[in-house]
Image (cartoon, rainbow, N blue to C red):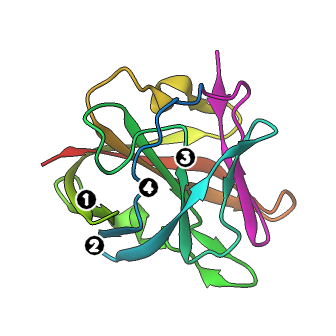
Amino acid sequence: MPSASLTSTGTTAQLRPRTPPPTRPAAPIAPALVTLPGVSAHVIRAAVTGGALDVPENVDQVGWWTGGAGVTSRSGTIVLAGHVDSARQGLGAFAALREVPVGAHVRLTGGGWSRSFVVTGRRSYSKSAGLPSSLYAQGVGLRLVLITCTGAFDPVKRSYEDNLVVYATPV
């Protein structure tokens, strides 16, 4: 079963699927900005390279999986992944994601479009077990998945033990 984890080493992180999710043939409109309580971050494209989703090195940016849905999509999963922090750069764009409650509103903008979502759930996944492949599903109703690190920090591995996944649906 495909799975993934967001790992951090210094200022870089990668979402590492054991089997890369399929890429959508269409080119949906990329989000340019994500805003929610405590978070306002520019979004850049993040492709799967060598089986890993490239998360921006700049902790102030968030990566959008280009194989997923976009701002104007009617279905599928919009996947955004970002850093919680970095030893060199400080707090990351998704540092406040740990505190965002169910019911909070998320806004994506891009390409002259704006889309609002409401947080419906949150869950932590052990990096050793990986993220479920269902996070990348495109044959589902439109949803937003936000991913960052959480849990205890392992100073030897220079990585957090878990991933936090926040789920949201269109308003």
Q: Amino acid at mark 1?
A: Pro
Q: CA distance from mark 1 to mark 4?
A: 25 Å
C-alpha distance separating marks 3 and 2: 22 Å
Residue ranking furthest to the top: 1
Residue at numbered disc 3 = 65
Q: Give the spatial CA distance, label 2 vs label 4.
A: 21 Å
Residue at image coords 26%, 28%: 141
Query: Badge 2: few (under 14), some or many (20 or more) residues near its Cα, within 10 Å?
Result: few
Between 104 and 171, the one lying in front of the other is 171
Q: Position of residue 67 (x, y in %)?
A: 54, 38
In the rendered image, which quarter is residue 114 located in? bottom left
- Looking at the image, do the residues carrying marks 4 and 3 touch, with CB atoms under 8 Å apart? no
When the figure is inspected, residue 96 is found, relative to residue 89, above or below; the finding is above
The reply to whether the magenta stretch includes residue 15 is yes
Please state which of residues 139 and 9 is positioned toward the viewer in this rendering.
139
The kind of residue on which mark 2 rests is Pro
Which label's residue is closer to the chain start, 1 or 4? 4
Q: Residue 135 appears at what percent x and percent y?
A: 47, 32
Report how far apart the C-alphas of labels 3 and 1 lie in the structure: 24 Å
Of mark 4 and mark 3, the one earlier in the sequence is 4
Residue under circle 1?
101
Dot 2 corresponds to which residue?
37
Residue that lies at the very extreme toward the right in this rendered image? 156
| N-term-proximal mark, 1 vs 2 | 2
| Residue name at image x 19 percent, y 52 percent | 118
Q: Which mark is residue 30?
A: 4
Q: Helix or strand or loop: what does disc 1 sit on?
A: loop
Q: What amino acid is at disc 3? A: Trp
- Which dot, 1 or 2, sits closer to the camera? 2
Task: Find residue 63 and report its horizontal and vertical position in percent.
Answer: 56, 58
Range of residues picked out in magenta:
1-21
Q: Reading the chain from its start, which is encountered first: label 3 or label 2?
A: 2
